[in-house]
C-alpha cells in the first residue's frame, strides 16, 4: 500500500529541464552519485557536475544521506534517465553572493583548494583564482604550503559571462597596512625623536620603518660628516634613532634625520675639547690671515697667522701646507657660533719651555754631583729665567 502511494506521488511530480530540485544523496560511486528527488527515478549526478573544481572522486564532496539542491540539465523519458547538476545550482547562488561582496568591497575568508601555475584556486561555488601577484605583499617563490590554508580575500574582478572571479589577499593586507599607516601618522609629531629600522637603501637616502610607516632619511641627514652613499654607513635591518623633521599626512610622507637625533659635531667638540687642551688636527685650508685646522669631523678651528709660529711670518704657507697634521692648543670655543680659536705657537713654546726645564734639571743634577765650576756660576741669570 505504501509503495502504491509513493508511485502515485512520483507520477504526480512534474520535472523539466532547468528545474531546481531538492533531493537526497542515495548512492555514491567513484564517478557519479544518485540523487533521490521524489521522482519516479533517481537523478544521475556525474562527477563533472559536482563541483566547479576538479575532484578525483565524488566521495570527496558528497556522502549518502546528504541533502542537496540540483538542477535538471537533461531529461530522457525513453531511457528513464535524468542528469542533474549540483555545480549549476551552486554557481547561481555564488554569482549573486559574489556580486554583492564585490560591490560592497567585503572581505571574506576562503580555503585554498588547489595550487596551479600562476596562483591559487578556491571553490566559491564557482572557480575563484588568486593570482600569484595578489597572494602576499612580498614575492612568494613556492606556494606549496598554501594548500588548505585559509586566507582573507576581496573580489577585485568579476565577469559572469567569462566565468571569471579574481580574488586578492594582497589587497586586504594593503588595506590593513594603510589603516595602520593612518593611525601611525596621526600619532607622530614633528620634532619627536623615535626608534626605527632601516628597510631599504637607495642612492639618495634610506627608508626607515617607524612603527609601520616608512620615512625617508635623505643622504644629507644620515651623518654630520659627508656620506658618499648610504650603504657606506647603514645596512638593511639596522636599528636607528631618528628625529622627525616633517610629516605630510595628505601624501603620507615623513622626512627623518639620523644626524639631528645625535649631538652635533660642535656640541660634541664643546664637550670633548676644553680651553687649554692640546689636540691633534689636520690643516684643511690656508688663507691670508691664518689656517683652518680640522680637529674632528665637521669641526674646524682657526689658527690666526699670529698663532702659527713663534717668529714673524708673512704668509701661513711659509710654515704650513694643506693636509699636514699639527698639534694645536684650544684658546677658545663657541659651539653656538661654530667657532674655535687655536694656536700652534703656544704648543711650540710650551714644548720649548718643557725641553729647557729638562736641560736645567739635568744641569742641576750634574752640578749637585760636584763638577767644580758650576753652570750656575756661568749661566745663573739665564737659568733663573727658565726656572721661573
Image (cartoon, rainbow, N blue to C red):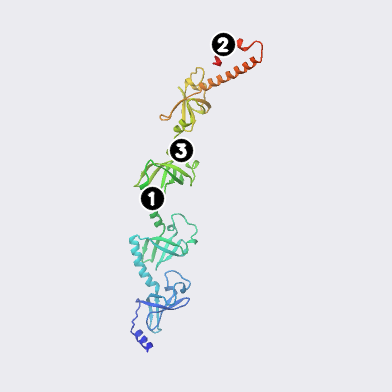
Q: What element does badge 1 sit on?
A: helix
- Whole-number angstrom distance, CA of label 3 to CA of label 2: 57 Å
- Whole-number angstrom distance, CA of label 1 to CA of label 2: 82 Å
Q: Which of 202 and 97 is in front in this view?
A: 97
Q: Residue drawn 37% across and 47% down?
A: 187
Q: What element does badge 2 sit on?
A: helix
Tell me where residue 352 sits by quadrant: top right
Q: Which mark is residue 181?
A: 1
Quadrant placement of the N terminus:
bottom left
Quadrant placement of the C terminus:
top right
Tell me where residue 366 sits by quadrant: top right
Crowd class of label 2 (few under 14; some 14 to 19; many from 20; radius 10 Å): few
Question: Which of labels 3 and 2 is toward the front?
Answer: 2
Q: Residue drawn 57% across and 14% down?
A: 383
Is residue 204 in sight in this rendering? no
Q: Is residue 364 left or right of residue 278?
A: right
Q: What x and y, as percent, mark residue 377? A: 61, 10
**Sequence-wise, which precedes: disc 1 or disc 2?**
1
Q: Mark 2 points at which residue?
A: 381
Q: What element does badge 3 sit on?
A: loop
**Sequence-wise, which precedes: disc 1 or disc 3?**
1
Q: Residue 223 carries which label?
A: 3
Question: Which of labels 1 and 2 is toward the front?
Answer: 2
Q: Is residue 276 above or below residue 364?
A: below
Q: Residue drawn 59% across and 19% down?
A: 358
* Callouts 1 and 2 close, C-beta under 8 Å: no
Amino acid at each position: 500500500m505504501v509503495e502504491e502511494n509513493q508511485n502515485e506521488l512520483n507520477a504526480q511530480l512534474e520535472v523539466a529541464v532547468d528545474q531546481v530540485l531538492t533531493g537526497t544523496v542515495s548512492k555514491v560511486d567513484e564517478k557519479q552519485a544518485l540523487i533521490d528527488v521524489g521522482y519516479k527515478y533517481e537523478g544521475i549526478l556525474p562527477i563533472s557536475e559536482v563541483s566547479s573544481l576538479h575532484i578525483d572522486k565524488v566521495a570527496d564532496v558528497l556522502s549518502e544521506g546528504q541533502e542537496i539542491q540540483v538542477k535538471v540539465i537533461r531529461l530522457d523519458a525513453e531511457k528513464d534517465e535524468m542528469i542533474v547538476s549540483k555545480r549549476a545550482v551552486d554557481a547561481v547562488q555564488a554569482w549573486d553572493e559574489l556580486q554583492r561582496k564585490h560591490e560592497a568591497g567585503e572581505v571574506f575568508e576562503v580555503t585554498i583548494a588547489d595550487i596551479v601555475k600562476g596562483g591559487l584556486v578556491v571553490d566559491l561555488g564557482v572557480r575563484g583564482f588568486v593570482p600569484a601577484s595578489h597572494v602576499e605583499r612580498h614575492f612568494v617563490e613556492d606556494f606549496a604550503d598554501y594548500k588548505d590554508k585559509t586566507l582573507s580575500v576581496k573580489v577585485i574582478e568579476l565577469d559572469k559571462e567569462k566565468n571569471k572571479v579574481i580574488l586578492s589577499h594582497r589587497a586586504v593586507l594593503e588595506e590593513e597596512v594603510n589603516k595602520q599607516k593612518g593611525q601611525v601618522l596621526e600619532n607622530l609629531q614633528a620634532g619627536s625623536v623615535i626608534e626605527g629600522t632601516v628597510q631599504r637603501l637607495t642612492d639618495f637616502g634610506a627608508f626607515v620603518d617607524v612603527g609601520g610607516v616608512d620615512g625617508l632619511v635623505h643622504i644629507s641627514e644620515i651623518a654630520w660628516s659627508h656620506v658618499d652613499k648610504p650603504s657606506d654607513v647603514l645596512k638593511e635591518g639596522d636599528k636607528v634613532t631618528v628625529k622627525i623633521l616633517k610629516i605630510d599626512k595628505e601624501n603620507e610622507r615623513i622626512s627623518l634625520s639620523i644626524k639631528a637625533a645625535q649631538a652635533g659635531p660642535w656640541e660634541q667638540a664643546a664637550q670633548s675639547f676644553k680651553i687649554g687642551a692640546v689636540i691633534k688636527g689636520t690643516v684643511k685650508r690656508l688663507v691670508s690671515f691664518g689656517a683652518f685646522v680640522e680637529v674632528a669631523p665637521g669641526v674646524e678651528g682657526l689658527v690666526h697667522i699670529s698663532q702659527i709660529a713663534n717668529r714673524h711670518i708673512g704668509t701661513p704657507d711659509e710654515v704650513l701646507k694643506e693636509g699636514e697634521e699639527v698639534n694645536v692648543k684650544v684658546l677658545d670655543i663657541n659651539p653656538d657660533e661654530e667657532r674655535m680659536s687655536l694656536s700652534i705657537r703656544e704648543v711650540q713654546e710650551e714644548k720649548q719651555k718643557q725641553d729647557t726645564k729638562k736641560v736645567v734639571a739635568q744641569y742641576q743634577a750634574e752640578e749637585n754631583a760636584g763638577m767644580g765650576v758650576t753652570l750656575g756660576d756661568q749661566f745663573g741669570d739665564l737659568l733663573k729665567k727658565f726656572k721661573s
